[in-house]
């Protein structure tokens, strides 16, 4: 690359500025030759996204956060099968450990909350939605 003090050519209808470095590019450019900017055709939408914080709060009852994020089968299994089994096993283990195995339940509870926080959303977008972009 050669250093020059020459000014950038003025913008026209057929050109645009690079969003990162300001270099003048053709309007249909896919990447900038002076920096690492690459055009992505992926539209980012605010609709159809489940909040991770709400999923964690709903996971106070293990499984509800998963249901909220669209993982209905996993949520129902945790709610009606996983949690009662975890409580039963912790109580059974507590009889042999002078009650110390009860502390396994908060570990299970936080693990379910963390999983609800980290899984991808499956909340479908409304098919008639205009999908505002930001």
Image: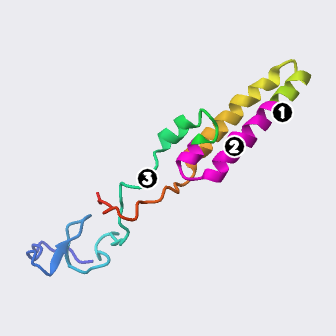
Tell me residue 118's x, y (percent).
56, 48
95 or 18, nearer to the observer: 95
- Using a 10 Å C-alpha cutoff, classify the residue at mark 2 as few (fewer than 14 neighbours), some (14 to 19) or many (20 or more): many
User: Relative to 13, is 72 on the left or the right?
Assistant: right
Callout 3: SS: loop
Q: Give the magenta-colored segment's residue range.
A: 65-88
- Using a 10 Å C-alpha cutoff, classify the residue at mark 1 as few (fewer than 14 neighbours), some (14 to 19) or many (20 or more): some
**Which residue lies at the image location 49% right of the left edge and 44% below the top edge?**
52
Q: Mark 3 near mark 1, Cβ–Cβ under 8 Å?
A: no
The CA span between labels 3 and 2 is: 22 Å
Tell me residue 65's x, y (percent).
57, 42
Q: Check disc 1 and report the residue beneath it.
A: 89
- Using a 10 Å C-alpha cutoff, classify the residue at mark 3 as few (fewer than 14 neighbours), some (14 to 19) or many (20 or more): some
**Which residue lies at the image location 59% right of the left edge and 46% below the top edge?**
66
Q: Check disc 2 and report the residue beneath it.
A: 78
**Which residue lies at the image location 74% right of the left edge and 41% below the top edge?**
82
Tell me residue 3's x, y (percent).
20, 74
Q: Check disc 3 and report the residue beneath it.
A: 49
Q: Is residue 134 above or below residue 110?
A: below
């Amino acid at each position: 690359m050669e250093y020059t003090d020459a000014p950038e050519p003025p913008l026209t209808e057929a050109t645009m500025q690079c969003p990162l470095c300001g270099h003048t590019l053709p309007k249909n450019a896919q990447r900038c030759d002076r920096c690492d900017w690459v055009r992505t055709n992926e539209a980012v939408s605010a609709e159809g996204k489940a909040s991770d914080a709400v999923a964690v709060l709903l996971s106070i009852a293990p499984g509800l956060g998963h249901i909220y994020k669209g993982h209905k089968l996993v949520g129902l299994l945790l709610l009606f099968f996983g949690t009662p089994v975890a409580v039963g096993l912790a109580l059974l283990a507590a009889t042999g450990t002078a009650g110390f195995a009860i502390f396994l339940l908060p570990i299970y509870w936080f693990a379910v909350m963390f999983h609800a926080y980290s899984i991808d959303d499956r909340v479908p977008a409304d098919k008639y939605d205009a999908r505002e972009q930001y």
